[in-house]
Image (tube, helix red, strand yellow):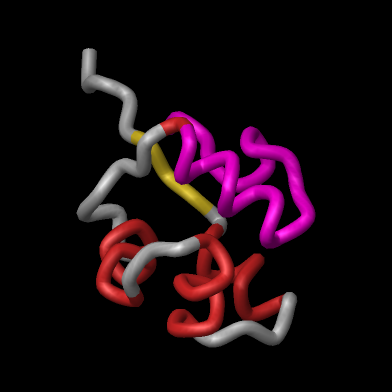
Amino acid sequence: MKPLELNNHLKERRIGKGLSQEELAKLIGTSRQTIISIEKKQYNPTTKLAILLSVALDCKVDDLFYLE
């Protein structure tokens, strides 16, 4: 059985809010590179970062991140 991977809708939600990667990063106090890495599924955010992203993007954490 293949292990589950953490996926996300970060890019779609960010674009839907009209935010650049830089703008979102500044809103939550992280770097643009972190946003890029999460969008490319190269980095799994901490729980705190996932919550900050969901608040900034006005959605639930489980609407933003999911296992597949």
Picture quadrant of residue 38:
bottom left
3 vs 30, nearest the viewer = 30
Question: Looking at the image, how many numbered discs can be counted on the residues?
Answer: 0
Q: Is residue 66 left or right of residue 54?
A: left
Q: In the displayed image of the protein, which residue is found farthest to the front?
A: 29
Picture quadrant of residue 2:
top left
Say which quadrant the C terminus sits in.
top left
Q: As displayed, is residue 30 above or below residue 66?
A: below
Q: In the displayed image of the protein, which residue is found farthest to the right?
A: 58
Report x, y in % for residue 56.
68, 60
54 vs 64, nearest the viewer = 54
Q: As displayed, is residue 63 above or below residue 67?
A: below
Report x, y in % for residue 39.
38, 63
Q: As displayed, is residue 42 above or below residue 37?
A: above
Q: Is residue 13 left or right of residue 59?
A: left
Report x, y in % for residue 32.
34, 76
49 vs 40, nearest the viewer = 49
- Is 43 within the magenta? no
Residue at the spot 36% in from the left edge and 43% down from the top edge: 45
Q: Is residue 34 left or right of residue 27?
A: left
45 vs 40, nearest the viewer = 45
Residue at the spot 58% in from the left edge and 40% down from the top edge: 51
Residue at the spot 54% in from the left edge and 82% down from the top edge: 23
Q: Which residues are magenta?
A: 48-68
Q: In the displayed image of the protein, which residue is found farthest to the top?
A: 1
Say which quadrant the N terminus sits in.
top left
Q: As displayed, is residue 59 above or below residue 35?
A: above
Q: Main secondary structure of the magenta part?
A: helix
- Is 54 within the magenta? yes
Residue at the spot 72% in from the left edge and 77% down from the top edge: 16
Report x, y in % for residue 37.
27, 63
